[in-house]
Amino acid sequence: MRLIFMGTPAFALPSLERLAQSSHTICAVVTGLDQPAGRGLQIQVPPVKRRALELGLLVLQPQSLKTAEFAAQLRAYEPDLFVVVAFRILPAHLLTIPRWGAINLHASLLPKYRGAAPINWAIINGDQESGVTIFRLKPTVDTGNILSQRSILINAEDTAATLAERLATLGADLLVETIAMIAAGTVQEKPQDDELATPAPKIFPELGEIDWYKDAFTIKCLIHGLSPEPGAFTFWQGKRLKILRASWQPAAPSAEPGTIVACDKKRLVIQTGDGWLLPQELQLEGRKALPVAAFLPGFSGTRGDRFGA
């Protein structure tokens, strides 16, 4: 089968690698533009572009997906299938180019968590299960017929980063299996139930400010769902303090939410609206992230001090 692969971030790498090792032909890899990033605004190459070049694949980086010239370029490869993993929304006229249409790997059990940030929201909302879905693309976002799904448990220690790694590998395996079924004509499509759909909108940094009056489990879920980026945060002596990993435990209220109730060489305990939060990894503004045992020797807080603006 002749494929055109479309993707940009690291999440798409396991899928690209598995397909490159398969019997299918990747005619071209379409990815995002090189972009300036970081404090020095150094030009950063998308992970998918870097890996595709290492694999000896042709890379396309169109300024726009909407031009007739780009459509003609894709059509010239006579693709059987577009395979999309963590990429932009495709214009409707591109979906008619491949003989067998276009499929997308999405990091949720659709129709749950349609949108840009399904992994983040699954953890933020305290879900115990996540998964991947391969579905047929149509012009409206994340609404096409489901071709296959596979679920996975969310661990208490999972952050958005660790869950993304596991889902990327799971999705790559399922993608190869699903393409084989498409080629064999055995895949069975199932329409999504729109009444069961839930959103997973884009994450903005302001979502990360910790409300200490919420319960400890909810705060811990926010922390892990936003780790490592953009990060959940509070304030300490006028500086932003990110908490990147944490645990929690039930405890009767003994102080105002946001108050340090215990602090020693290995442990920092913070009162919430219900229960205690125990940060495990922290990053003070302008400094690198540290495990709590390495953070505490330079921390000036003591029992009774409070976090917050």
Image (cartoon, rainbow, N blue to C red):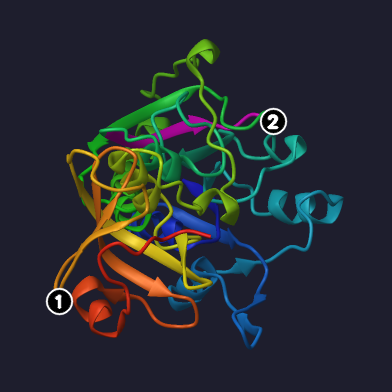
x, y percent for residue 288: 39, 81
Q: Which residue is mark 2?
A: 139
Q: Is residue 165 above or below residue 177?
A: below
Which contiguous range is marked in magenta?
Answer: 129-139
**In the drawing, what numbered circle is on residue 265?**
1
Query: Can I make out residue 23 in this image?
Result: no
Question: Residue 295 appears in which quarter of the rendering?
Answer: bottom left
x, y percent for residue 237: 48, 73
Question: Residue 298 appears in which quarter of the rendering?
Answer: bottom left
**In the drawing, what numbered circle is on residue 89?**
none
x, y percent for residue 244: 35, 62
Element carrying mark 1: loop
Amino acid tagged 1: Lys
* Dot 1 alpha-carbon crowd within 10 angstroms: few under 14, some 14 to 19, many 20 or more: few
Q: Is residue 190 above or below residue 250?
A: above
Q: Nearer the viewer, residue 36 or 123?
A: 123
The Cα–Cα distance between marks 1 and 2, rounded to whole angstroms, is 55 Å
Element carrying mark 2: loop
Amino acid tagged 2: Pro
With 279 as the anchor, is 197 left or right in this view? right
- Say which residue appears at 44% left-offset and 16% top-offset: 190
- Say which residue appears at 43% left-offset and 83% top-offset: 287
* Dot 2 alpha-carbon crowd within 10 angstroms: few under 14, some 14 to 19, many 20 or more: some
With 41 as the anchor, is 275 left or right in this view? left
Q: Nearer the viewer, residue 36 or 281?
A: 281
- Say which residue appears at 46% left-offset and 60% top-offset: 234
Q: Nearer the viewer, residue 33 or 162?
A: 162
